[in-house]
């Protein structure tokens, strides 16, 4: 174990309250591509800021729906990795000491067994109405591969995720801010730190901040220690 890893493992042992803020890199070793490193398919052609918006969906619902369909299919096939499992095992051994705050919509922390996950950007496995549903919106018309629509008014279903320009779920965001403000230690794992308000949580953390990321991130300057390694390699060592 390197000196820094040993030092952070000591902070974990001493901390009464730990907050873990995760991003797409947390699931990379499960086989889920990250947003800003990915080089294939729609990821290479469009930036997330161009696809993950209500305007993009209204302008081209089929393209955006297809992007989500590919990702849903991929996520349904993958498994939590050693990083997710180490977090959940720590929570089982130490109830109420670690809060998971995730930007991920893949549900892998939950599937690993982490309780009370604060999912800031929603859940890719679920849909919701694009516009406020009318009384007629019980007559859904599913056509394979297309966004389901109300047969009467044409209202569409959309993925139940948080797009750019949309508010984060208020309860989850407030609980995440409270977890940041009370923690003795925040582990910031696998996020570029480019997207707010999630990234801002690392800047309001009361305790020490540790970034776990194989590459440079926009939150490195907020960290007391930066560990250059992957989630699946480092979390099992940190959360012994
Ligand atoms: C590894 C690894 C391994 C690789 N192990 N690591 C303040 C300043 C400027 C702008 C704003 C601001 N506040 C708000 C904004 C606007 C905007 C924003 O942040 N814009 C920025 C681009 C500048 N934010 C919003 O619009 C948010 N809403 C909001 O603020 O509402 C209030 C409001 C409303 C109306 C008007 C005004 C205000 C909503 C943000 C929603 C983000 N949604 C997405 C899509 C979710 C659905 C979906 O999945 O499709 O969320 S975008 C995408 O980015 C997704 C992610 O959760 C999010 C963060 O990405 P993440 O997780 O960091 O992934 P990557 O790919 O960027 O990074 C991966 C990292 O992993 C890399 O660093 C790798 O090195 C690393 N890695 N392998 C560990 N094995």
Image: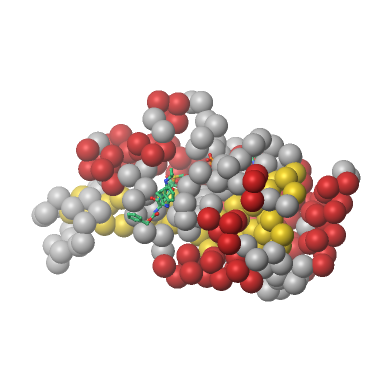
In the rendered image, which quarter contains the C terminus? bottom right
* Viewer-nearest residue: 98 or 193: 193
Q: Could you say which is closer to the camera, residue 65 or residue 76?
A: 65
The residue lying toward the viewer, choosing from 178 and 56, is: 178
* Residue positioned most to the front: 221
- x and y, in percent, of residue 103 in the image: 52, 52
Q: Give the residue at x 22% y 43%.
A: 58
Residue shown at 75% from the left, 49% from the top: 225
Lateral position of residue 130 relative to residue 159, left or right:
left
Q: Is residue 166 above or below residue 220?
A: below
* Tag count: 0
Asked which quadrant contains residue 123, the reply is bottom left
Is residue 103 at least partly visible in the picture?
A: yes
Please say if 234 is above or below 70.
Answer: below
Where does the image place residue 217, in percent across and percent down from the top left?
61, 40
Q: Indicate the quadrant containing the N terminus: top left, top right, bottom left or bottom right.
A: top right
Q: How is the image coloured?
A: secondary structure
Hey, which quadrant is residue 135 in on the image? bottom left
Could you tell me residue 83's position as x and y percent? 70, 50
Among all residues in the image, which is located at the extreme left? 152
Left or right, 176 with respect to 208, comes to left
> Would residue 69 be seen by someone viewing this image from the given angle?
no
Q: Position of residue 210 (x, y in %)?
A: 71, 52
Name the residue: 75% across, 72% down. 16
Which residue is found at the position 26% from the left and 57% from the top? Answer: 129
Q: Is residue 197 left or right of residue 231?
A: left
């Amino acid at each position: 174990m390197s000196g820094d890893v040993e030092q952070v493992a000591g902070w974990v042992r001493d901390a009464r309250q730990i907050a873990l803020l995760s991003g797409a890199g947390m699931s990379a070793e499960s086989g889920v591509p990250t947003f800003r490193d990915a080089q294939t398919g729609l990821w290479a052609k469009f930036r997330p800021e161009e696809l993950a918006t209500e305007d993009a969906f209204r302008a081209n619902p089929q393209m955006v729906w297809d992007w989500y369909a590919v990702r849903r299919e991929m996520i349904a096939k993958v498994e939590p990795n050693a990083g997710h499992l180490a977090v959940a095992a720590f929570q089982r051994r130490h109830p109420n000491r670690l809060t998971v705050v995730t930007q991920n919509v893949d549900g892998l922390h939950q599937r690993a067994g982490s309780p009370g996950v604060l999912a800031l950007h929603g859940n890719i496995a679920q849909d919701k109405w694009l516009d406020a549903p009318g009384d007629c919106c019980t007559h859904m018309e599913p056509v394979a591969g297309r966004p389901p629509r109300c047969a009467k008014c044409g209202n569409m279903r959309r993925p139940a995720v948080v797009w750019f320009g949309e508010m984060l779920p208020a309860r989850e965001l407030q609980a995440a801010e409270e977890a940041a403000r009370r923690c003795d230690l925040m582990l910031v794992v696998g996020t570029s730190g480019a997207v707010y308000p999630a990234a801002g949580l690392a800047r309001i953390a009361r305790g020490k901040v540790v970034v776990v990321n194989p590459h440079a991130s926009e939150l490195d300057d907020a960290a007391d220690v930066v560990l250059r390694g992957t989630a699946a390699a480092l979390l099992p060592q940190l959360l012994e």
